[in-house]
Image: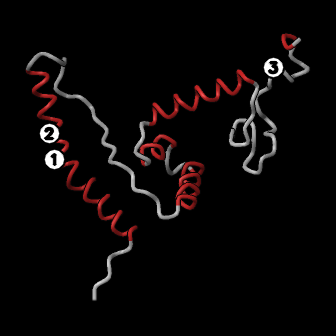
Amino acid sequence: MRHAPPPVRGARRTDAVQWQLFIPMFCAPVWRWFTEAAWAAGRIPTPEVPVEWSPPKFEAVDPQKDAMADLLAIRSGTMTLAEAIARQGRNPDAVLAEIAATNAKLDELGLVLDSDPRRVTKTGSAQANAPADAATDPDDPEAD
C-alpha cells in the first residue's frame, strides 16, 4: 500500500512546477505575446513591459512557525518585507499602503496597539524610542 506524500513535500513540488515550468514555459510567452500585440496595436509605447509573477500561496501546515521563520529571515536581512508579503500571494505595495493608512488612523485617534512595533516591543513593553504622542508629550508646546 502506498502512502501519500506529506502535504509540505507536495506543496514544494507544486511550487517548483510553478516557478520552473509553468511560469517560464506558459506565463512568460503568453505575456510576451500579449505585450507585443498591444505594442503592435499602438496601445503601449514599448513591447518590453516588466512583470512580476506571484503564484497563489499555500496554506501553512504550521502558520506560527512559518511566521516566525519569515520574521527571522526579515530581521536577519536574508529576505525583505516585500518578499514575505509576496510569498503570501499579496501585493507588497498595496499591503504597505494599507499598513501606513492604518498606522496614520491609529495615530490620529491616539490609539496604541500591542501589535504596533513602532511603539511596543514583542513582549508588550513600550518602545524606548517610540514616536512622541502629541496628546501626551509634556515637552510639546502645541499639545496644550
Residue 85 image offset from top left, x and y in percent: 47, 43
| Gap between marks 2 and 3 measured at Cα | 54 Å
Callout 2 crowding tier (Cα within 10 Å): few <14, some 14–19, many ≥20: few
Element carrying mark 3: loop
In front of the other: 104 or 21: 104
Q: Amino acid at mark 3?
A: Ala
Callout 1 crowding tier (Cα within 10 Å): few <14, some 14–19, many ≥20: few
Q: Name the residue: 77% across, 33% down.
A: 130
| Gap between marks 1 and 2 measured at Cα | 6 Å
From the viewer's perspective, is 122 left or right of 24?
right
Q: Which residue corresponds to mark 1? A: 26
Q: On screen, 135 above or below 65?
A: above
Q: Name the residue: 80% across, 24% down.
A: 133
Q: What label does residue 30 carry, if any?
A: 2
Task: Kindly check if marks 1 and 2 are in contact, taking CB atoms under 8 A apart as contact.
Answer: yes
Q: Name the residue: 51% across, 51% down.
A: 78
Q: Which residue corresponds to mark 3? A: 134
